[in-house]
Image (tube, rainbow, N blue to C red):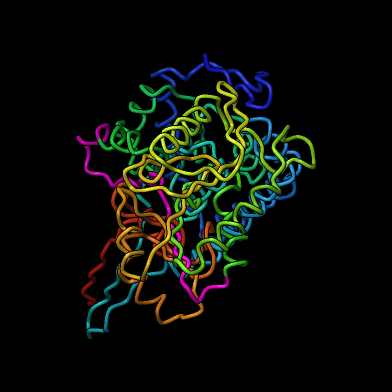
Amino acid sequence: MFQCRSPIDGHTVYSEGYHSDEVIDETVERARLGQIVWRQTSLDDRLKRLQVATDYLFDHREEIGLEITNQMGRPVRYSAGELAGVKERSEHMLGLAKTALEDIRPAAVEGFDRKIARVPLGVVAVLAPWNYPFLTSVNAIIPALAAGNSVILKHSEQTPLVALRYQQAFEIAKLPVGVFQYLFLSHEGAAKLVASPGVDYVAFTGSVAGGHAISKAVRDKFIDVGLELGGKDPAYVRGDADAAEAAISLADGAFFNSGQSCCGIERIYVARGLFDQFVVGVVSEAEKLVVGDPRLPETTLGPLTSAKGADFVRQQISDAIGQGATAHLPIDDNWGSAYLAPQVLTNVTHDMNVMKQETFGPVVGMMAVDDDQQAIDLMNDSQYGLTASIWTQDVEAARLIGAQLQTGTVFLNRCDYLDPGLAWTGVKNSGRGCTLSSIGYEQLTRPKSYHFKLS
């Protein structure tokens, strides 16, 4: 058995038994049989049904948003917005499908019919986390289904109701039996699922350790694995930036969702001449946040998903202060509580864990820099490479800086956003593979060549 306990007050949101090895095998077999029917369904029909499912989720966003709040603690004033993001990404990927999946025709050769088709892989296993439970999973689920695959979803134990909502949406959309299914699995069960001979692709979002575990589980199979493993995302505020605007946006990027975002801002490098002004601006934004019960409309910062996670952040802050960092907000020493106040740290160095390890909490460290090269070197000084954010009025300078950054995405004058028209990808310990954009479909299909000699 597992229990989803709300970080709000510890009440049980949902409890269920883990699915057995036998059920895993049966689920994979149903997925394989269902995929035979689904891949033969016309693309237009598939897209129409997936739009119905998308509409269901969006139309029920208020009640689903409250479910998200109860499961993982995000303030209810923001939770329904996640379903708006689902609609945006889903509809964008559905709109790309016909072009992304169309046959590739090489130059004509008389007497021959030649093409490269993109065909579905088969069964796609999606393993999703709790921090953005719909947004992290829809990136793979919708395009996988649009391409003609079947999907088995293993969602986090912290957000199990998300799997049930997906099931309802796809039942209303009348997907064939077996095309979408979910499983509640322990770590051992998840390893068995991805290692199953019937699973043809794995899309995993989670920790670096989890990514290694997935890679180990599939090592005896020749399949691809998409891994999104988080980040320690930096921002650089150049001397010509609008410091006030940058402070507002980067504070939001650091503290929204209690800092529990793979592409949230965790470290900021600021031109020395702007540093003091910028710090004041970020601290001012942090002081406006209202920490409390996320079910209340005035709350803007809810609990972290677990007290253990909050204490991990407290320890990073405490260690940094012990090494000489300066805290600009009251220090939260409520150990054992999932509720954690925001913090801004200066006088930090890369010898401190708060500037090296993924924090996943409402704290940001800031350093002054003397020039672009110093900022580039510090931004690249990380085991992660998901996104980086540059703040400047000089677009050409941003292009030059961005070309030297070891990340999957470079932002200019914005941060903490996924554009579904662009590839979502990372380097180094942020993972490998890609979701979203037309390139995302390449991960979920394989090329198949047809070379016909005409009589």
- Compared with 132, 120 (above or below) is below
Give yes or no for residue 233 being in the magenta stretch: yes
Instruction: Locate residue 452 relative to residue 365 in the image: left or right.
Output: left
Q: Position of residue 10 (x, y in %)?
A: 65, 19
Q: In the rendered view, does 84 fall on the left or right side of 406?
A: right
Residue drawn 42% across and 45% down? 36
Magenta-drawn segment: 216-242
Can residue 38 be seen here? The reply is: no
- Report x, y in % for residue 200: 33, 42
Relative image position of residue 21 (x, y in whole percent): 38, 19
| Vertical arrangement, residue 147 with respect to residue 114, above or below | above
Front-most of residues 325 and 443: 325
Residue 407 sits inside the magenta stretch: no
Q: Quadrant of residue 380?
A: bottom left
Q: Which residue is found at the position 22% from the left and 38% from the top?
A: 221
Near-viewer residue (313 or 160) = 313
Residue at position x 49%, y 44% in the image: 326
Q: Confirm whether residue 121 shows in the render.
A: yes
Q: Is residue 182 left or right of residue 15?
A: left
Q: Quadrant of the C terminus?
A: bottom left
Q: In terms of depth relative to the viewer, which is nearer, 103 or 159?
A: 159
Residue 439 position, x and y percent, is 39, 63
Q: Specify the quadrant of the image occupied by residue 356.
A: top left
Tell me the quarter of the picture where residue 125 sits: top left
Seen in the image, is 317 located left or right of residue 282?
left
Q: Is residue 112 above or below residue 355?
A: below
Q: Is residue 191 above or below residue 351?
A: above
